[in-house]
Amino acid sequence: MLGLIFAFTAGAVTLALLLAWAGRTPGAGELGRWAARYELDLRREDRPWVARELRRGRLLRTLGFTAVFGIGMGANIWWGAVHQVSTAPFPLNLLIHPAAWATGYLVGATVAELTRRGRDRQPVRAAALVPRRLGDYLPGWMLWVERGVALAVLALSPLPHLSPPDDPSGPGHGFMAGVAAIAIAAAVELALRSMVVRRQPVATPAELAVDDAMRSTSIHRTAGAGLAALLFLLGEQAGGLPPRVWLLSSVVGLLCYGLAIGAWKDLTVPLRWRIRRAYGSGGSGQAPLPRHDPGRGPA
């Protein structure tokens, strides 16, 4: 029992420190790197609002990750110590998988963007003259890769999977992973398109450019975490390959896990991304002028 108390205390302290780190306000250097990533000339008056929204987004993403991770690992430790079983019962046993952690992260990123509000001082609602498209904020190949990985996970579902005797998911684990992959891919695409069509409560071209950069940040976070979750599931499915190809199974599994970690780390934060709608092919480097709706208040 003493070991169980120590494990829960250490885990709680670690997660609390992680949330405290996520809740810190971005400094001037971090804001500068974020603005440079989107080739944005961030004005002094925009910095407090951008810092607040970046902090809020990071906190919600971290909260989504830590909630899933904490519940899953806590339940697993409890059932192992108290009930002497290898894993927690279904569905809690699903929360110890890295795909679930990435899903919690992308849910946090989605909530942060869809609940983001403009500055309270804005007297009007503005609508951009150029229509918004998902490809303006995110490389098109990412969606196609996500769809392909989800279909690959589904295609491997019939393969036999070895499960612990007390694992309630049993032989249906492969089919559950396939259904989860399709659900994650569909949810990610729906979330991304909802972010794109969300109204932009801005009044000037400079504020429109900042809003576009914030939107692209959330879209990259959600898409990268979604791809990571799908690659984690594909690596898990690779374990169902026949024993005679165990070497291939191991290599594919490790490769998928490595790619998943890379997607979560690198694709959620692009080195540089020029928003195509705000900085059109004409090379003007200026955001399109917004169209005001004088009959409406702030969004």
Image (cartoon, rainbow, N blue to C red):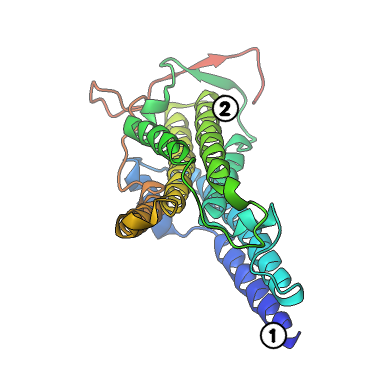
Other residues around mark 1 within 10 Å, as few (<14) / some (14–19) / many (≥20): few
Check disc 1 and report its element: helix, strand or loop: helix
Q: CA distance from mark 1 to mark 2?
A: 53 Å
Query: Residue 186: image x %, image y %?
Result: 53, 31
Q: Nearer the viewer, residue 249 or 294?
A: 249
Say which residue appears at 51% left-offset and 18% top-offset: 127
Q: Pick the quarter of the image with the N terminus.
A: bottom right
Q: Nearer the viewer, residue 44 or 59?
A: 59
Q: Which residue is mark 1?
A: 3
Check disc 2 and report its element: helix, strand or loop: loop
Residue 110, quarter of the rendered image: top right
Q: Decide if residue 17 is in sight here.
A: yes
**Could you tell whether 244 is left or right of 57 in the image?**
left
Give the residue type that dot 2 points to: Pro
Q: Decide if residue 216 is in sight here.
A: no
**Could you tell whether 271 is left or right of 129 in the image?**
left
Q: In the picture shown, does residue 229 fall above or below 163? A: above
Q: How many marks?
A: 2
Q: Which mark is residue 228?
A: none
Residue 245, quarter of the rendered image: bottom left
Say which residue appears at 41% left-offset and 57% top-offset: 30
Q: Which residue is mark 2?
A: 201
- Look at the numbered discs 1 and 2 and tell me whether their residues touch, using CB distance below 8 Å: no
Q: N-terminal of the two: label 1 or label 2? A: 1
Residue 276, quarter of the rendered image: top left
